[in-house]
Image (cartoon, helix red, strand yellow):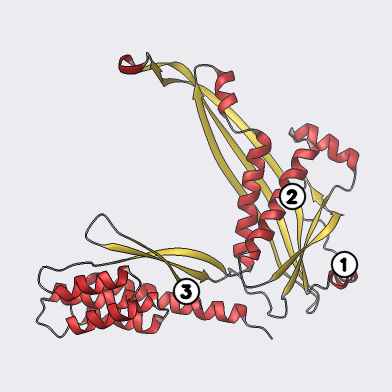
Amino acid sequence: MLWMLLSLVIGVSCTKNVSLTRLAPAEISIPSHVQRLLIVDRTEPESQGFAIIEGILTGEAPFEVKNAIETTLATIQQELNTSPRYEVIRARGRLKGGLFSQTFPQPLIWSQIESLCASYDADAVLALEKFSSDFIVTDKKALIKKTVGTGKEAKEIEVDGIYAEGVASVQVGFRFYDPVNRNIADQIDFNKTNLWSAEAETRTQALALMIDKVRATQVVGQMAGASYARRVAPMYLTVSRSFFPKSKTNPALGHGARLAEVNQWEQAIDTWIKGLDAPNDEKTAGKLAYNIAIGYEVLGNLVLAQEWAGKAYTNYGFKKGRSYALNLTQQIMADELVRRQLAVE
């Protein structure tokens, strides 16, 4: 199933929410013969001496970068393992490649790719081939809030202080080698940044509160790894849907909603459908049809869900039904793409 019911959350307004998880399609489709995927670290510097000099110039200690690379690769593996698309394995050791490089190294030769696949019984190779990072901290004078006094005497005042910002960035490059077709199925750069801030009375205090450079680089590396996983594999995501829990004129709406709350969605749908046979104003009928659509989506029948969302709008003028029907049409297409991406030859 591409859809699963997760939980029901009672809303604080005139609707209640149900959370669903679904598989979103990968950004690109990888040939279906690729089932067992080998992840390779190709960022070992060509020259250790050059890497040390480059690290000094950029302010990056080689061990810091290596830790960030490991975090990036571990994230890719963890994320891909949550998808049903591949069986994922990691290669031992590192290959020489593009540490601190702004451009991709020459591609690995096919005999090397084939040797790696044979050694690990893999169908394809995903290689991290370039990695560079940066962490810039700036600060400026600012008024900051400070609590003085204790207990009932405590109050908040503004004092002169320092506001500091730290921006971490990574640029990483991935190649996806397909030895069967002898082509590079994907080659892409990812640039990820994140910002942290802190404020205190002195610069030293503000920087002490700031995330350290090593951890900041690891965080943006994780972001890059997660982004690439979504590029090449269908990934689960959570969506929330709202349905209507009550009506002043038709008790079937509330009865069905209570059934839905205890996960009796088939009975809820039957109740709402029977509710449409009673005399209803257009708004109430539209809510009933809309709820029926939600119910069918929860049960995984997107075709019937789309049909009933359309009825909510076309038969009863319920405007939310139009946008929901269009959303479901897109999801039906996305589900079909996921099925193709998960197909095994």
Of residues 317 and 8, the one drawn nearer to the viewer in this rendering: 8
> Which numbered disc, 3 or 1, marks the residue closer to the eye?
3
Q: Mark 1 points at which residue?
A: 109
Taking the spot 40% from the left edge, 82% from the top edge, the residue there is: 301
When asked about the image quadrant of residue 277, the answer is: bottom left
Q: Name the residue under label 3.
A: 3
Taking the spot 59% from the left edge, 63% from the top edge, the residue there is: 230
Q: Label 2, secondary structure: give it.
A: helix
Q: What residue type is labelled 2?
A: Glu
Q: Label 1, secondary structure: give it.
A: loop
Gap in Å between the C-alphas at discs 3 and 1? 41 Å
Is 28 left or right of 279, judged from the image as shown? right
Mark closer to the chain start, 1 or 2 = 2
Mark closer to the chain start, 2 or 3 = 3
Q: Mark 2 points at which residue?
A: 70
Q: Which amino acid does label 1 sit on?
A: Ile
When asked about the image quadrant of residue 155, the answer is: top left
**Is residue 31 in view?**
yes
Residue 211, position in %: x, y? 60, 33
Mark closer to the chain start, 3 or 1 = 3
When asked about the image quadrant of residue 240, the answer is: bottom left
Q: What residue type is labelled 3?
A: Trp
